[in-house]
């Protein structure tokens, strides 16, 4: 009488499959991570383009003064005033997120104070209403060596 063999995997066969899956994951994961970074870079550039265009449009309708200035006073700058003036004028529909840290906050640079020399990542964005300079607040560089702050 013949015994029917039950189909079961041995421990060695399972370990070989796990090893193959691990090797495939090691190959695919860096490619996936690179694509995620490239997507964040593209989103950052697009958000900056949209915001800078909205700022220029606002300024064109307000005698060259950018949003965020109370009563066209470039020495006073406040995030609330920036969003109030942008949202009320329908220049943007929502607070954009910095795709790297998911923050929507803005570090407002008042009057003649200089823009920071580098990004810290503590805010979503950095904006100086007096010059209408708007930048992303994220340290580091892309794969070509360009600082995110300089986008």
Image: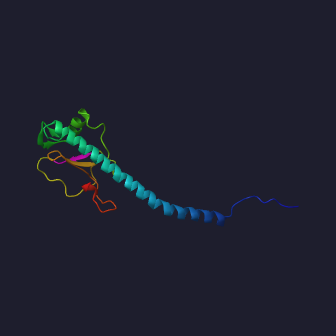
Where is residue 134 shown, x and y percent of the image? 22, 48
On screen, 62 above or below 139? Answer: above
Q: Quadrant of the N terminus?
A: bottom right
Query: Which region is colored magenta?
Result: 105-109
Q: Quadrant of the C terminus?
A: bottom left
Give the quadrant of residue 22.
bottom right
Asked if residue 52 lies in the magenta stretch, the reply is no
Q: Residue at x 76, y 58 (%)?
A: 6
Indicate left or right for 15 with 84 as reference.
right
Number of marks present in the image shown: 0
On screen, 136 above or below 16? Answer: above
Where is residue 94 shown, x and y percent of the image? 31, 38
Q: Residue at x 30, y 50 (%)?
A: 45
Residue 99 in view in this figure: no
Where is residue 71 shown, x and y percent of the image? 12, 36
Where is residue 112 shown, x and y percent of the image? 11, 50
Give the quadrant of residue 69.
top left
On screen, 50 above or below 20? Answer: above
Indicate left or right for 97 with 73 as reference.
right
Q: Main secondary structure of the magenta part?
A: strand
Asked if residue 108 lies in the magenta stretch, the reply is yes
């Amino acid at each position: 009488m013949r015994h029917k063999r039950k189909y079961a995997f041995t421990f060695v066969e399972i370990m070989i499959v796990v090893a193959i899956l691990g090797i495939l994951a090691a190959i695919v994961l860096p490619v996936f991570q690179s694509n995620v970074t490239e997507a964040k870079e593209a989103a950052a550039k697009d958000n900056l383009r949209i915001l800078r265009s909205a700022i220029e449009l606002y300024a064109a309708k307000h005698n060259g003064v950018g949003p965020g200035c109370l009563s066209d006073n470039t020495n006073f700058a406040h995030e609330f005033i920036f969003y109030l003036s942008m949202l009320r004028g329908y220049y943007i529909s929502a607070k954009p997120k910095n795709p790297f840290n998911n923050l929507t906050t803005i570090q407002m640079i008042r009057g003649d104070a200089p823009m920071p020399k580098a990004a810290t990542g503590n805010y979503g964005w950095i904006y100086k209403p007096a010059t209408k300079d708007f930048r992303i607040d994220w340290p580091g560089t892309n794969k070509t060596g360009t600082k995110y702050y300089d986008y």
